[in-house]
Amino acid sequence: MNDDPLHERRSAMKAALRERVLAARAAQDPALRAANGASIVGHLLRLPSVFTAHTLCAYVGFDTEIDTAPFLATVLAQGRRLLLPRVVEAGSRTRRHLVLHQVGDVDRDTRPGRWGIREPDPAHCPVVDPLEVDLVLLPGVAFDRRGGRLGYGAGFYDRLLPRLRPECLRVAAAFSLQVVAEVPLEPHDQRCQCLVTEAGEVLLTNQ
């Protein structure tokens, strides 16, 4: 248990920000959410770094997140390697981690996981070393223009990202309403290097 007052304050700030942004995302008109999500996917697919990456790690959109299905389908149709994460239980909450699996068909090779999010079926999808990833598409709740990222609170990507090669590009996709003035960060929090919204790529300032 962490009794540091600064940690406690930042944790409370994160919780409040997470609640506010998730509520705003859920309040979007479904038609507008779908249209904005399609625009985001289009911008992602036009990024040179995405176009040239051979092995990409992404995720299956869930609930009010961006629908990533068109992005995943395009990566596979172009003959590139698509990796999706699977949550592995390892006792305590902080020891849960993500294992990456190569997927050949998203509908066939995935199944609902712990929170209903579709993840690879380990019986059919081989494990891939994170060091093989060229580009990772990050989910998240809130982002800022310094690359700050607020996740859902489990810390899965904060534990995964240090295991990637330094040159692996960290790309986040989010609705504009998820971009905030500042995400409260702690030393273990990992940043993104590129942020894409329905308006296009967001220019990030020095981190």
Image: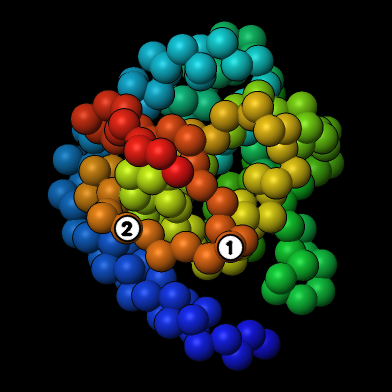
Amino acid marked by disc 2: Glu
Where's the N terminus, which quadrant?
bottom right
Q: Position of residue 52 (x, y in %)?
A: 56, 11
Q: CA distance from mark 2 to mark 1?
A: 15 Å
Nearest to N terminus: mark 2 or mark 1:
2
Q: Is residue 63 visible?
A: no
Amino acid marked by disc 1: Pro
Q: Quadrant of residue 182?
A: bottom left
Is 99 situated above or below 34?
below
In this rendering, would 43 be left or right of 86?
Answer: left
Relative depth, front residue between 62 and 194: 194
Secondary structure beneath dot 2 equals loop
- Residue under pointer 2: 182
Mark 2 neighbour density, 10 Å: few (under 14) some (14–19) many (20 or more) = some
Relative depth, front residue between 167 and 75: 167
Mark 1 neighbour density, 10 Å: few (under 14) some (14–19) many (20 or more) = few
Q: Position of residue 144 (x, y in %)?
A: 34, 49
Q: Is residue 44 visible?
A: yes
Which residue is depicted at the point 33% across and 22% down? 43
Q: Position of residue 183 (x, y in %)?
A: 37, 59
In this rendering, would 108 be left or right of 186?
Answer: right
Where's the C terminus, which quadrant?
top left
Relative depth, front residue between 130 and 74: 130
Is 192 situated above or below 189?
above
Question: What label does residue 110 carry, if any?
Answer: none
- Residue under pointer 1: 187
